[in-house]
Amino acid sequence: MGVVVQKYGGSSVADVERIRLVAERVAACQAAGNQVVVVVSAMGDTTDELLALAHRVAESPARRELDMLLSAGERISMALLSMALNARGVPAVSFTGSQSGIITDDAHVNARIVEVRPYRIQDELARGRVVIVAGYQGVSYKKEVTTLGRGGSDTTAVALAAALDAEACEIYSDVAGVFSADPRLVPEARRLSEISYQEMQELAEAGARVLNARAVEFAKDRGIAIYARASSGEPGETVVRRFPPRAPGRVVGVASETGLVLLTLTTPDAGRLRALLAACDARGAHGKELLFRGGDSPHASVAVSLENVPDWSRLRAELQEHFGDRLAVRYGVGAVSAIGAGINAGYRDLGVALDTLAALDVALLGVATSSFRISLLVDAARVGDVVRHLHSALVEPAPTAGASTS
């Protein structure tokens, strides 16, 4: 009897009826002879609602207290799912992150898992119970409740799969796998039957929402295959695992994100740039891209996502006090990224991306490249247009019969 770890996102447990459907799927998995561990997110938009509530009480809520508040959402889901299973005659028990042995560092709101001690989970599995775990949370070595940042339930699931030597880690959401672009923006986007860890991590970091980038990194380090599926039962899946290198220059997908702020420092030297980055780090505002230009009018720009920055107003005030008019802040910035192994082996793909912006008359605010990614910073209002046209221009054509979709 093998261990299967399943994770269900917020949309999969958004209401009582969906929780009952998840309970049916979990019960069927156990009936097939598996020991089942289920990781759940908060119901629907609960986390956003709790975060909004916190900001109504305090402009810059204390991070420790945010963790105490936000971790409550997953506890509701875990208890309800356990009740639904027990009502069906399936023995189940729910655990918080700390009860599950998820040990993290002490970085509140964006903690990292440093160790998993799943002893209580193993004991309950041996007793024939399904174990329901609250995702997105753990306990620090200081015995403080911590949360793992947006999408942290994915990381919980992968970490438990590694600690329990699970046969599979199944991630369920409202879409049947990973697509070459967001189907809401690009109707012709196609599902990828398989994708490498590195490409998936880059897609996730660039804004793709199906899987969490940190979870993919965790899976890559430990060689755990991830199966991304739809909780609705819609056929199809994407398998994320280690694959041999593909031919360079093939683009597997286009991802995007909005809600970025561009911080631009004029006349930067090493000391000022270091001070800017240190101030961002101290507030958890980790940069998405760093752009630097020297010469007669030197400047450095850092693109920051506001999604995981609970005290942006305080950070901005600190930056303005420290840098004065040397620092410009631009809101309404978006990023569109094309992903593929060896995408920058030559300049063709970057050239096509730049031609696409020119044809759309979209201003380029910045560009960053790596061996797996081309990222374009543009006005957030034009992100949808750029994604659609870049997908059409760059994403590899559908494979012929019998070929891998990678």
Image (cartoon, rainbow, N blue to C red):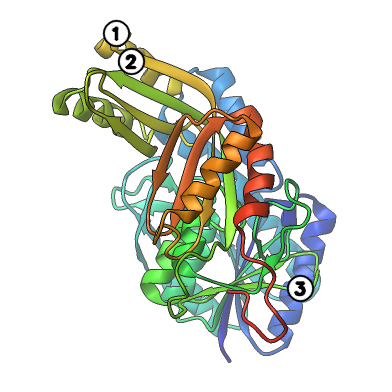
| Mark 3 vs mark 2, CA separation in Å | 53 Å
Q: Position of residue 77 (x, y in %)?
A: 67, 53
- Asked if 363 appears above or below 208 in the picture, the reply is above
Q: Quadrant of residue 270?
A: top left
Residue picked out by circle 3: 25
Instruction: List the residue tagged with mark 2.
Output: 327
Q: Residue furthest right?
A: 17
Q: Are marks 3 and 2 in contact (CB under 8 Å)?
A: no
Q: Disc 2 to disc 1, how far (Cα)?
A: 6 Å
Q: Could you say whether the residue bearing mark 3 is in a helix, strand or loop?
A: helix
Which quadrant does the C terminus fall into? bottom right
Amino acid type, mark 1: Gly
Residue density around tag 3, few if under 14, some if 14–19, many if 20 or more, within 10 Å: some
Residue 345, picture quadrant: bottom left
Name the residue at 51% across, 57% down: 339
Are the residues at dot 2 and dot 1 in contact (C-beta closer than 8 Å)? yes
Structural distance between the alpha carbons of marks 3 and 1: 57 Å
Which tag is nearer the camera, tag 3 or tag 2? 2
* 382 relative position to 272: left or right: right
Q: Quadrant of residue 404?
A: bottom right
Q: Is residue 157 left or right of residue 263?
A: right
Mark 3 / mark 1, whichever is N-terminal: 3
| Residue corresponding to mark 1 | 324
Q: Is residue 22 above or below residue 151?
A: below
Query: Which residue shows up at 73% across the image and 52% down it?
Result: 11
Q: Position of residue 154 (x, y in %)?
A: 54, 60
Q: Residue at x 68, y 39 (%)?
A: 384
Q: Are marks 3 and 1 in contact (CB under 8 Å)?
A: no
**Who comes first in sequence, dot 3 or dot 2?**
3
